[in-house]
Image: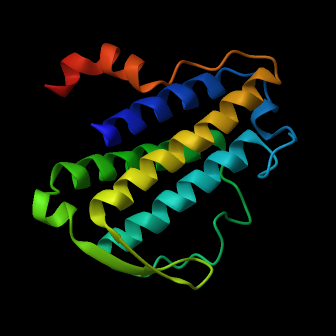
Amino acid sequence: MLTRYTAWANDRLFTALGQLPPGEVTAPRATSFGNMLRTLNHAYVVDMIWQAHLQGRPHGFTSRNTDGTPALAQLREQQQALDDWYILYADGLTGRLQSEVVHFRFVDGGEGAMTRGDMLLHVVNHKTFHRGYVADMMYQVPAKPPSMDLPVFLRDAAPDLS
């Protein structure tokens, strides 16, 4: 359910960002990643890193963001594909596999170990955190961000979850 929530919230946010005046998603903002698009790119890169950890393969990233940033439409397409992967992955995660501990290396080189279930929860929480950053930046446009709360998802998407 949480991976479906993430995909739903991402879709709502990308739709809203696509409706902003030209240049707003890349306009400089007082935030750690500099603008809305770079913030979403960071969240995507982190999703890719955790996907690699879950698959037991190297991720190849040396940073939690990339030097270049794709256009909004391209990033949206990439994020949707990755969201679909996380949904399928979570759907196939049995109780035993969910509790399996995976060892990995953090981007900074440190060692880590988490259960697969905890890794998925981190991906969902991390994405929620950064969508909140982008929502705050939308108010600076000024524009109203879409509602991306879990209860709204459960109300609006409940028939799709059965």
What residue is at 29 percent from the left and 64 percent from the top?
116
Name the image quarter holding the N terminus. top left
Percent across and percent down for residue 59 are 47, 76
Question: Residue 111 versus residue 85: which sits nearer the camera?
Answer: 111
Quarter of the image with the C terminus is top left
Q: How many marks?
A: 0
- Judge left or right: residue 54 versus residue 24: left
In this rendering, the answer to whether 132 lies above or below 59 is above
Q: Is residue 93 above or below residue 52?
A: above
Q: Nearer the viewer, residue 135 or 85?
A: 135
Relative image position of residue 160 (x, y in whole percent): 21, 22
Q: Residue at x 42, y 80 (%)?
A: 104
**In the figure, is residue 113 to the left or right of 72?**
left
The x, y position of residue 48, in whole percent, is 47, 63
Colouring style:
rainbow
At a point 75% along the width and 35% down the height, the residue shown is 25
Figure quadrant of residue 136: top right
Q: Residue at x 60, y 22 (%)?
A: 16
Does 148 sit left or right of 31 as displayed? left
The image quarter in which residue 156 lies: top left
Q: Position of residue 45 (x, y in %)?
A: 56, 60
Q: Is residue 139 above or below residue 48?
A: above
Judge left or right: residue 87 versus residue 96.
right
